[in-house]
Amino acid sequence: MSHYLVTGATGGSTSGAAAPNRLEINDFIKQEEQFSLYIQALQFIYSGKSQSDIDSFFQIGGIHGLPYIPWDGAGKEPVDTDAWEGYCTHGSVLFPTFHRPYVLLVEQAIQAAAIKIASTYTVDKARYQDAALNLRQPYWDWAKNSIPPPEVISMDEVTIMDPNGQKISVPNPLRRYTFHPIDPSFPEPYQSWQTTLRHPSTEDANASDNVSQLKATLRSAGPQLTTKTYNLLTRVRTWPAFSNHTPDDGGSASNSLEGIHDGVHVDVGGNGHMSDPSVAGFDPIFFMHHAQVDRLLSMWSALNPGVWITDGPSGDGTWTIPPDTVVGKDTNLTPFWNTQTSYWISANVTDTSRMGYTYPEFNDLDMGDQASVRTAIATQVNKLYGGPISTLTTTTLGQPSSRVTAERTAAGTDTSGTSSQSTNIKPESTLKRSIDEAPQIKLSSTGGHDEQKEIWEWSARVQIKKYEIGGSFKILFFIGSVPSDPKDWATDSHFVGAFHGFVNSSAERCANCRRQRDVVLEGFVHLNEGIAKLSNLNSFNPDVVEPYLKENLHWRVQKVSGEVVNFDAVQSLEVVVVSTRLTLPPGEIFPVPAETHHRHHITHGRPGGSRHSVQA
């Protein structure tokens, strides 16, 4: 049997890079040649192929979960019929590396189709053939642009240049995937939905996307996504803490890459396909999302040279990996063949240029000089995502750049080239009002340029059993009043962030899921921006913030369907407030944690609060 080798896209070049760049979607849609080819190629692997073809979109999307069948001979049957039967490695140290050849596979299939399409052009054929060689899967930088462009989430048709040199409108394959047919393995409601859906209006067969709800949810999530991403890149230093959402933050009080990824899945999907691991791979935005996850892996690796995958538990297991075993750098990343007799492994996916792609942040860098690369990427992280660095280098917290950048982007305002350390940003009037109304919180440092600055950062740590709720969910946090209507929770002005569980909704099919009821998820919701915006405090110091949060911090649990979950149904939930004193010593580019405290008494005695009463 000859296997389909995952080689990625080949050919092409980007100036200053060892391989062509993957582009951010807002930049990608402006590249007429590549965008035109991408749209046509994506449509071809949707409908120009049978769903049984190995390189069809359905077969590639189905690797992640349903229909739970072997792909290209990688395991004729599941190693444990009671375990998770998709190939994806969630809750495992393999999470970041598994998805690297996965995105590579769809990129390869799209480019193969694009090359054939480019050869049919009768106008500017050479230009389109060159564009096909440079075509790579775009990524969606949700940490900077929390709402994707209309070409991704709302336009049913897009304009492209056809092979005859004419601009035409065509059905937009980024909007949805149409099943042909719906696979019989799909449970309800997916069995009733002919297409993928985001925030479906109902569970009926005639359901449609609620685009306004999707946009409002993503806009509200934007500032928290920015802060979570900044903290991940600047505070997390160990592979277990970086890679997956099981408890082990490495002392960083920060989310894992998988944890942040989970939130995007849930917020994009609502009660639709993206919020369920068993069918998420069929939504066209899935690979745009995972290209961003892969980009963050590249950036984090550059900031932590020499740190790579360490051994860890396999979690729920996969089609080929038994649960409750040890996995590591040499574990096969099935079903992705890199030769006729071997699979990709984590040890050989460290260099993306050898896999045929790069990211713009690495252009013009000497990749052999780890120190200079680290400095360059650190500068980009501060520029793109700001975070605590902005509050440590300005005189007040009235203008937190991460919030301004995220909200301006969500409002459709261009932020390209804006420095995270700038204090003269002029947002739109409504955004300016929200910033101006924020209290002016002074830093503890009042000295000269070389004096060490410091600030306290506040977060809510969440731990909860993964399968206790029975599907994907959110734990939403509020400072101040909680709206009486749960429909308003995620977009209310007092909402400050959420923890998300990205969980198979058909866990009853998975006996191992039932066996592993005690598997715990962990994540953090960062509170500083909410405190700054909603309180009348003039400090982040513990003696001021502790009593305020004890009185004003609230949380609620909600399924992706919108159903409210009572606290007595989530006995495992524990919310603990964590405070970290951050300093910015002279010469440091990122804030440095100086001390961390778990302030149990803030939530102790409340439903879902800390089980301990003494500060740690």
Image (cartoon, rainbow, N blue to C red):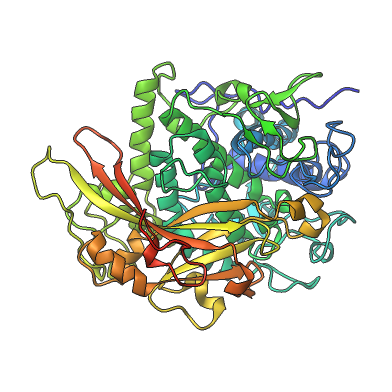
Residue 172 location (% of width, % of height):
68, 54
* Depth order, front residue of 464/267: 464
Residue 96 location (% of width, % of height):
59, 37
In the depicted structure, whether residue 147 falls above or below residue 554: above
* Depth order, front residue of 587/33: 587
Residue 482 location (% of width, % of height):
45, 78
In the depicted structure, whether residue 148 falls above or below residue 120: below
Residue drawn 84% across the image and 25% down it = 3
* Depth order, front residue of 303/145: 303
* Depth order, front residue of 487/199: 487
Question: In this rendering, does residue 63 appear at all?
Answer: yes
Question: In this rendering, does residue 420 appear at all?
Answer: no
Which quadrant of the figure has residue 326? top right
Q: Is residue 19 left or right of residue 157?
A: left
Q: Is residue 220 left or right of residue 52?
A: left
Which quadrant of the figure has residue 615? bottom left
